[in-house]
Amino acid sequence: MLRSAMKATVIVSLKPTVLDPQGMTIHRSLASLGLTNISDVRQGKIFDVSIKDGASRQEVERLAKEVLTNPVIEEYRIIWE
Amino acid sequence: MLRSAMKATVIVSLKPTVLDPQGMTIHRSLASLGLTNISDVRQGKIFDVSIKDGASRQEVERLAKEVLTNPVIEEYRIIWE
């Protein structure tokens, strides 16, 4: 059977209670560009992960939890394709 | 009428032809962690944007296109909530 590799998307974002200086800097610069209706910007990271056929989803869970996320300030979610 | 602000998610990723050193570094480190079934990792950025009620979607388009994306090496897509 011909199948392309499985894909998953891991989204890592700062916990809502954590200050996001990058997002705040972007937001502050918008007024000078005339984008006055944007009330908040928060930045996160996204990882497109390819997995070999037959691999378990647990590997992506481990990747997200142990490698890509700092559990002190960040949280993650995984979208399966 | 009571309504919470509109939200949009802007995803900025490197064009497929552009080398992704961050993703490659993550991918290389995985073998030593026993994550041998992950065949590729590519990193991108995600922005959670809040918009004032009644604002036009065009503002988010402009934000994505003119502020968040480097058109030489990156592409973006917008997910409306």
Image: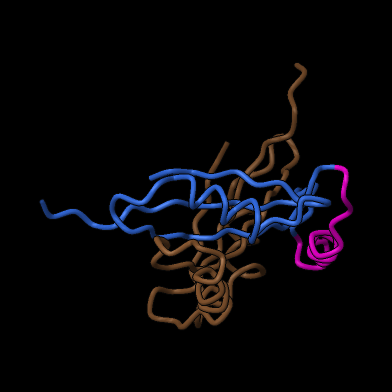
Chain colours: A brown, B blue
On screen, A54 above or below A28?
Answer: above
User: Which residue is at 74% across, 58% downward?
Assistant: B35
Of residue B75 and residue A54, the one placed in the foreground of this image is B75
Q: How many marks?
A: 0
User: Which residue is at 48% across, 52% downward?
Assistant: B59
What secondary structure predominates along the stretch shown in magenta?
A: helix
Q: Residue furthest left?
A: B1
Instruction: Place residue B63 in its image quadrant.
Output: bottom right
Of residue B20 and residue A9, the one placed in the foreground of this image is B20
How far from the left and from the top, in percent, is residue A40?
42, 68
On screen, B16 above or below B9?
Answer: above
* Residue A11 appears left or right of B21: left
Q: Residue furthest top?
A: A1
On screen, A51 above or below A15?
Answer: above
Residue extent of the magenta highlight: B17-34
Of residue A9 and residue B15, the one placed in the foreground of this image is B15
* Residue A15 appears left or right of B78: left
Residue B18 is covered by the magenta coloring: yes
How far from the left and from the top, in percent, is residue A5?
74, 34
How far from the left and from the top, in percent, is residue A16?
39, 74
User: Which residue is at 23% across, 57% downward?
Assistant: B4
Dividing the image into 4 quarters, which one contains the C terminus of chain A? top right
User: Which residue is at 54% across, 82% downward?
Assistant: A21
How far from the left and from the top, in percent, is residue B39?
80, 47
Residue A8 is covered by the magenta coloring: no
Dividing the image into 4 quarters, which one contains the N terminus of chain A? top right
